[in-house]
Amino acid sequence: MKNSRFILIVGCGRLGSQLANQLSRDGNSVVVIDKDEATFSNLSPDFSGFRVNGDATQMVVLKEAKLRKADVLIATTHEDNVNLMVAQVARKIFCVPHVLARVFDPKREEFYAQLDIDTVCPTSLGADLFLRAVARGIAGQEGAQS
Amino acid sequence: MKNSRFILIVGCGRLGSQLANQLSRDGNSVVVIDKDEATFSNLSPDFSGFRVNGDATQMVVLKEAKLRKADVLIATTHEDNVNLMVAQVARKIFCVPHVLARVFDPKREEFYAQLDIDTVCPTSLGADLFLRAVARGIAGQEGAQS
Protein backbone atom coordinates (compact mmCIF):
# COMPACT_ATOMS: atom_id res chain seq x y z
CA MET A 1 0.00 0.00 0.00
CA LYS A 2 1.34 3.40 -1.01
CA ASN A 3 0.97 5.12 2.32
CA SER A 4 1.99 2.18 4.52
CA ARG A 5 4.26 3.33 7.36
CA PHE A 6 5.98 1.77 10.35
CA ILE A 7 4.16 3.30 13.30
CA LEU A 8 5.11 2.78 16.93
CA ILE A 9 2.46 3.45 19.57
CA VAL A 10 3.33 3.79 23.25
CA GLY A 11 0.44 2.89 25.53
CA CYS A 12 -2.33 0.43 24.72
CA GLY A 13 -5.15 1.98 26.75
CA ARG A 14 -8.37 3.22 25.17
CA LEU A 15 -6.66 5.83 23.00
CA GLY A 16 -3.56 3.82 22.07
CA SER A 17 -5.49 0.69 21.19
CA GLN A 18 -8.05 2.63 19.12
CA LEU A 19 -5.20 4.18 17.12
CA ALA A 20 -3.40 0.84 16.79
CA ASN A 21 -6.52 -0.91 15.52
CA GLN A 22 -7.33 1.81 12.99
CA LEU A 23 -3.78 2.35 11.72
CA SER A 24 -3.25 -1.40 11.37
CA ARG A 25 -6.57 -1.68 9.50
CA ASP A 26 -5.35 1.11 7.18
CA GLY A 27 -2.44 -1.09 6.13
CA ASN A 28 0.38 0.31 8.27
CA SER A 29 2.92 -1.78 10.18
CA VAL A 30 2.11 -1.09 13.81
CA VAL A 31 3.99 -1.92 17.01
CA VAL A 32 2.36 -1.24 20.38
CA ILE A 33 4.31 -0.99 23.63
CA ASP A 34 2.70 -1.23 27.06
CA LYS A 35 4.10 -2.24 30.43
CA ASP A 36 0.76 -3.77 31.38
CA GLU A 37 0.22 -6.89 29.27
CA ALA A 38 -3.51 -6.93 30.09
CA THR A 39 -4.03 -3.80 27.98
CA PHE A 40 -3.29 -5.78 24.81
CA SER A 41 -6.79 -7.24 25.16
CA ASN A 42 -7.99 -3.83 23.88
CA LEU A 43 -6.58 -4.72 20.45
CA SER A 44 -9.12 -5.99 17.95
CA PRO A 45 -8.85 -9.55 16.58
CA ASP A 46 -7.81 -8.20 13.16
CA PHE A 47 -4.87 -6.19 14.59
CA SER A 48 -1.95 -7.41 12.52
CA GLY A 49 0.93 -5.63 14.31
CA PHE A 50 3.32 -6.56 17.10
CA ARG A 51 2.93 -6.20 20.86
CA VAL A 52 5.93 -5.34 23.05
CA ASN A 53 5.38 -5.80 26.77
CA GLY A 54 7.70 -3.41 28.60
CA ASP A 55 8.42 0.08 29.95
CA ALA A 56 8.89 2.49 27.03
CA THR A 57 11.09 4.78 29.11
CA GLN A 58 13.77 2.07 28.94
CA MET A 59 16.04 2.16 25.92
CA VAL A 60 16.16 -1.63 25.62
CA VAL A 61 12.38 -1.73 25.19
CA LEU A 62 12.43 0.98 22.52
CA LYS A 63 15.16 -0.92 20.68
CA GLU A 64 13.19 -4.15 20.87
CA ALA A 65 10.25 -2.28 19.35
CA LYS A 66 12.57 -1.13 16.51
CA LEU A 67 12.11 2.57 17.18
CA ARG A 68 15.04 3.35 14.87
CA LYS A 69 13.00 2.15 11.88
CA ALA A 70 9.80 4.00 12.83
CA ASP A 71 8.31 6.60 10.50
CA VAL A 72 5.93 7.75 13.22
CA LEU A 73 5.89 7.50 17.01
CA ILE A 74 2.73 8.26 19.01
CA ALA A 75 3.00 8.54 22.81
CA THR A 76 -0.45 8.01 24.33
CA THR A 77 0.11 7.07 27.99
CA HIS A 78 -1.74 8.78 30.84
CA GLU A 79 1.43 10.43 32.08
CA ASP A 80 2.63 13.64 30.45
CA ASN A 81 6.17 13.05 31.71
CA VAL A 82 6.38 9.59 30.15
CA ASN A 83 4.98 10.87 26.85
CA LEU A 84 7.40 13.78 26.82
CA MET A 85 10.41 11.61 27.60
CA VAL A 86 9.61 8.96 24.99
CA ALA A 87 8.78 11.60 22.39
CA GLN A 88 12.07 13.42 23.00
CA VAL A 89 14.08 10.20 22.77
CA ALA A 90 12.31 9.33 19.52
CA ARG A 91 12.85 12.76 17.99
CA LYS A 92 16.36 13.61 19.19
CA ILE A 93 18.16 10.26 19.54
CA PHE A 94 16.37 8.02 17.06
CA CYS A 95 15.52 10.85 14.62
CA VAL A 96 11.99 9.57 14.03
CA PRO A 97 10.54 11.89 11.34
CA HIS A 98 7.10 12.40 12.88
CA VAL A 99 6.49 12.32 16.64
CA LEU A 100 3.15 12.95 18.31
CA ALA A 101 2.22 12.98 21.98
CA ARG A 102 -0.87 13.20 24.11
CA VAL A 103 -0.49 16.04 26.59
CA PHE A 104 -2.95 16.53 29.43
CA ASP A 105 -1.57 19.84 30.68
CA PRO A 106 -2.42 22.52 28.08
CA LYS A 107 0.42 24.71 29.38
CA ARG A 108 2.96 22.22 28.06
CA GLU A 109 1.86 22.38 24.42
CA GLU A 110 4.13 25.29 23.51
CA PHE A 111 7.14 23.53 25.01
CA TYR A 112 6.45 20.41 22.94
CA ALA A 113 6.13 22.51 19.79
CA GLN A 114 9.65 23.85 20.38
CA LEU A 115 10.87 20.25 20.47
CA ASP A 116 9.20 19.57 17.10
CA ILE A 117 6.67 17.24 18.69
CA ASP A 118 3.02 17.40 17.56
CA THR A 119 0.53 17.33 20.40
CA VAL A 120 -3.08 16.51 21.00
CA CYS A 121 -4.57 17.84 24.24
CA PRO A 122 -7.83 16.10 25.19
CA THR A 123 -8.40 18.65 27.97
CA SER A 124 -8.56 21.66 25.64
CA LEU A 125 -10.51 19.68 23.07
CA GLY A 126 -13.05 18.52 25.62
CA ALA A 127 -13.45 22.03 27.01
CA ASP A 128 -14.09 23.45 23.53
CA LEU A 129 -16.74 20.86 22.79
CA PHE A 130 -18.50 21.29 26.14
CA LEU A 131 -18.58 25.07 25.70
CA ARG A 132 -20.07 24.65 22.23
CA ALA A 133 -22.64 22.17 23.56
CA VAL A 134 -23.62 24.56 26.37
CA ALA A 135 -24.00 27.37 23.82
CA ARG A 136 -26.14 25.14 21.59
CA GLY A 137 -28.28 24.18 24.60
CA ILE A 138 -28.88 27.84 25.45
CA ALA A 139 -29.84 28.59 21.84
CA GLY A 140 -32.19 25.58 21.88
CA GLN A 141 -33.88 26.65 25.13
CA GLU A 142 -34.58 30.10 23.69
CA GLY A 143 -36.45 28.59 20.73
CA ALA A 144 -38.06 25.49 22.19
CA GLN A 145 -37.68 22.96 24.98
CA SER A 146 -34.16 21.55 25.11
CA MET B 1 -26.28 39.40 30.58
CA LYS B 2 -28.85 37.93 28.21
CA ASN B 3 -27.48 34.41 28.11
CA SER B 4 -26.48 34.16 31.77
CA ARG B 5 -27.32 30.72 33.17
CA PHE B 6 -26.88 28.86 36.45
CA ILE B 7 -24.35 26.18 35.61
CA LEU B 8 -23.24 23.42 37.96
CA ILE B 9 -19.93 21.70 37.23
CA VAL B 10 -18.94 18.44 38.93
CA GLY B 11 -15.19 17.95 39.14
CA CYS B 12 -12.63 20.74 39.33
CA GLY B 13 -9.72 19.02 37.61
CA ARG B 14 -8.14 20.38 34.43
CA LEU B 15 -11.31 20.09 32.37
CA GLY B 16 -13.80 21.14 35.04
CA SER B 17 -11.78 24.16 36.13
CA GLN B 18 -11.18 25.29 32.54
CA LEU B 19 -14.93 25.17 31.92
CA ALA B 20 -15.70 26.89 35.23
CA ASN B 21 -13.26 29.71 34.52
CA GLN B 22 -14.55 30.29 30.99
CA LEU B 23 -18.26 30.02 31.79
CA SER B 24 -17.84 32.34 34.79
CA ARG B 25 -15.93 34.81 32.60
CA ASP B 26 -18.82 34.66 30.11
CA GLY B 27 -21.16 35.99 32.79
CA ASN B 28 -22.84 32.79 33.97
CA SER B 29 -23.45 31.87 37.61
CA VAL B 30 -21.22 28.87 38.18
CA VAL B 31 -21.00 26.40 41.06
CA VAL B 32 -18.18 23.83 41.12
CA ILE B 33 -18.28 20.67 43.23
CA ASP B 34 -15.21 18.59 44.04
CA LYS B 35 -14.48 16.21 46.90
CA ASP B 36 -10.81 17.26 46.82
CA GLU B 37 -10.56 20.83 48.09
CA ALA B 38 -7.05 21.21 46.63
CA THR B 39 -8.47 21.16 43.09
CA PHE B 40 -10.10 24.55 43.67
CA SER B 41 -6.63 26.04 43.21
CA ASN B 42 -7.18 25.35 39.48
CA LEU B 43 -9.77 28.14 39.45
CA SER B 44 -8.54 31.47 38.16
CA PRO B 45 -8.47 34.54 40.45
CA ASP B 46 -11.36 36.11 38.50
CA PHE B 47 -13.64 33.07 38.99
CA SER B 48 -16.75 34.60 40.52
CA GLY B 49 -18.73 31.45 41.28
CA PHE B 50 -19.14 29.20 44.31
CA ARG B 51 -17.08 26.19 45.41
CA VAL B 52 -18.74 23.22 47.12
CA ASN B 53 -16.36 20.77 48.74
CA GLY B 54 -18.04 17.36 48.79
CA ASP B 55 -18.92 14.11 47.04
CA ALA B 56 -21.36 14.82 44.20
CA THR B 57 -22.80 11.30 44.40
CA GLN B 58 -24.38 12.31 47.72
CA MET B 59 -27.77 13.98 47.52
CA VAL B 60 -27.00 16.39 50.38
CA VAL B 61 -24.04 17.78 48.42
CA LEU B 62 -26.11 18.24 45.25
CA LYS B 63 -28.76 20.04 47.28
CA GLU B 64 -26.16 22.30 48.88
CA ALA B 65 -24.96 23.17 45.37
CA LYS B 66 -28.57 24.07 44.45
CA LEU B 67 -28.87 21.52 41.66
CA ARG B 68 -32.64 22.08 41.55
CA LYS B 69 -32.07 25.61 40.24
CA ALA B 70 -29.45 24.66 37.64
CA ASP B 71 -30.04 25.33 33.94
CA VAL B 72 -27.05 23.19 33.02
CA LEU B 73 -25.11 20.41 34.75
CA ILE B 74 -21.72 19.26 33.45
CA ALA B 75 -20.16 16.10 34.94
CA THR B 76 -16.42 16.14 34.28
CA THR B 77 -14.86 13.73 36.77
CA HIS B 78 -12.38 11.03 35.75
CA GLU B 79 -14.86 8.28 36.54
CA ASP B 80 -17.52 7.35 34.00
CA ASN B 81 -19.68 5.79 36.72
CA VAL B 82 -19.67 8.96 38.82
CA ASN B 83 -20.46 11.11 35.79
CA LEU B 84 -23.27 8.80 34.73
CA MET B 85 -24.81 8.68 38.19
CA VAL B 86 -24.70 12.44 38.76
CA ALA B 87 -25.98 13.12 35.24
CA GLN B 88 -28.91 10.74 35.72
CA VAL B 89 -29.83 12.26 39.09
CA ALA B 90 -29.71 15.74 37.55
CA ARG B 91 -31.84 14.78 34.54
CA LYS B 92 -34.40 12.45 36.11
CA ILE B 93 -34.80 13.64 39.71
CA PHE B 94 -33.92 17.33 39.53
CA CYS B 95 -35.19 17.79 35.94
CA VAL B 96 -32.18 19.92 34.94
CA PRO B 97 -32.91 21.02 31.34
CA HIS B 98 -29.44 20.44 29.88
CA VAL B 99 -27.10 17.74 31.20
CA LEU B 100 -23.66 16.97 29.76
CA ALA B 101 -21.12 14.36 30.80
CA ARG B 102 -17.58 13.42 30.00
CA VAL B 103 -17.45 9.75 29.02
CA PHE B 104 -14.15 7.90 28.61
CA ASP B 105 -15.57 4.67 27.27
CA PRO B 106 -16.86 5.35 23.73
CA LYS B 107 -19.17 2.32 23.98
CA ARG B 108 -21.25 4.12 26.60
CA GLU B 109 -22.17 7.11 24.44
CA GLU B 110 -25.28 5.52 22.93
CA PHE B 111 -26.56 4.61 26.40
CA TYR B 112 -26.15 8.21 27.59
CA ALA B 113 -27.99 9.47 24.51
CA GLN B 114 -30.98 7.30 25.45
CA LEU B 115 -30.99 9.02 28.85
CA ASP B 116 -31.07 12.44 27.16
CA ILE B 117 -27.56 13.25 28.36
CA ASP B 118 -25.13 15.00 25.98
CA THR B 119 -21.65 13.50 26.00
CA VAL B 120 -18.11 14.45 25.08
CA CYS B 121 -15.67 11.57 24.68
CA PRO B 122 -12.03 12.69 24.81
CA THR B 123 -10.89 9.23 23.71
CA SER B 124 -12.70 9.32 20.36
CA LEU B 125 -11.80 12.98 19.88
CA GLY B 126 -8.13 12.37 20.56
CA ALA B 127 -8.04 9.36 18.25
CA ASP B 128 -9.58 11.37 15.40
CA LEU B 129 -7.07 14.17 15.81
CA PHE B 130 -4.07 11.81 16.00
CA LEU B 131 -5.23 9.99 12.88
CA ARG B 132 -5.57 13.29 11.03
CA ALA B 133 -2.13 14.41 12.23
CA VAL B 134 -0.57 11.13 11.08
CA ALA B 135 -2.25 11.55 7.68
CA ARG B 136 -0.98 15.15 7.45
CA GLY B 137 2.53 13.99 8.37
CA ILE B 138 2.49 11.36 5.64
CA ALA B 139 1.32 13.95 3.11
CA GLY B 140 4.09 16.28 4.30
CA GLN B 141 6.79 13.64 4.00
CA GLU B 142 5.80 12.95 0.42
CA GLY B 143 6.30 16.62 -0.51
CA ALA B 144 9.18 17.68 1.70
CA GLN B 145 10.93 16.82 4.96
CA SER B 146 8.46 16.66 7.83
Image (cartoon, coloured by chain):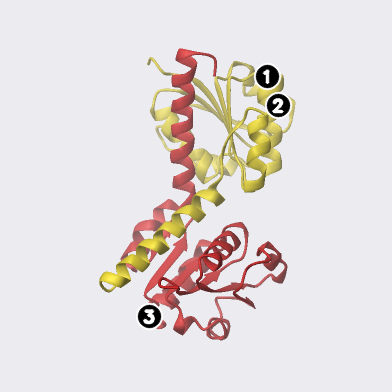
Chain colours: A red, B yellow
Q: Residues within 10 Å of mark 2 (few under 14, many from 20)?
A: some
Circle on res. A6: none
- Disc 2 to disc 1, C-alpha distance: 7 Å
Tell me the kind of residue under disc 2: Val
Tell me the kind of residue under disc 3: Cys
Q: Residue at x 71, y 41 (%)?
A: B81
The disc numbered 2 marks a residue on which chain?
A: B
Circle on res. B89: 2
Q: Are marks 2 and 1 in contact (CB under 8 Å)?
A: yes
Q: Which residue is mark 1?
A: B94
Does residue B109 appear to the left or right of A6 in the view shown? Answer: right
Q: Which quadrant of the rendered structure holds the N terminus of chain A?
A: bottom left
Q: Residue at x 27, y 74 (%)?
A: B145
Does residue A144 appear to the left or right of A107 in the view shown? Answer: right
Secondary-structure class at tag 2: helix
Tell me the kind of residue under disc 1: Phe
Q: Position of residue B77 (x, y in %)?
A: 61, 42
Q: Earlier in the sequence, mark 2 or mark 1?
A: 2
Q: Position of residue B121 (x, y in %)?
A: 56, 45
How many numbered marks, from 0 up? 3
* Discs 3/1, front: 3
Residue furthest to the left in view is B144
Q: Which residue is mark 3?
A: A95
The image quadrant that residue A111 belongs to is bottom left
Q: Which quadrant of the rendered structure holds the C terminus of chain A?
A: top right
Does residue B110 appear to the left or right of A84 in the view shown? Answer: right
Q: Residues within 10 Å of mark 3 (few under 14, many from 20)?
A: some
Of A30 and A93, nearer the camera is A30
Q: Is residue B47 visible?
A: no
Secondary-structure class at tag 3: loop
Q: Residues within 10 Å of mark 1 (few under 14, many from 20)?
A: some
Classify A106 as above or below A133: below
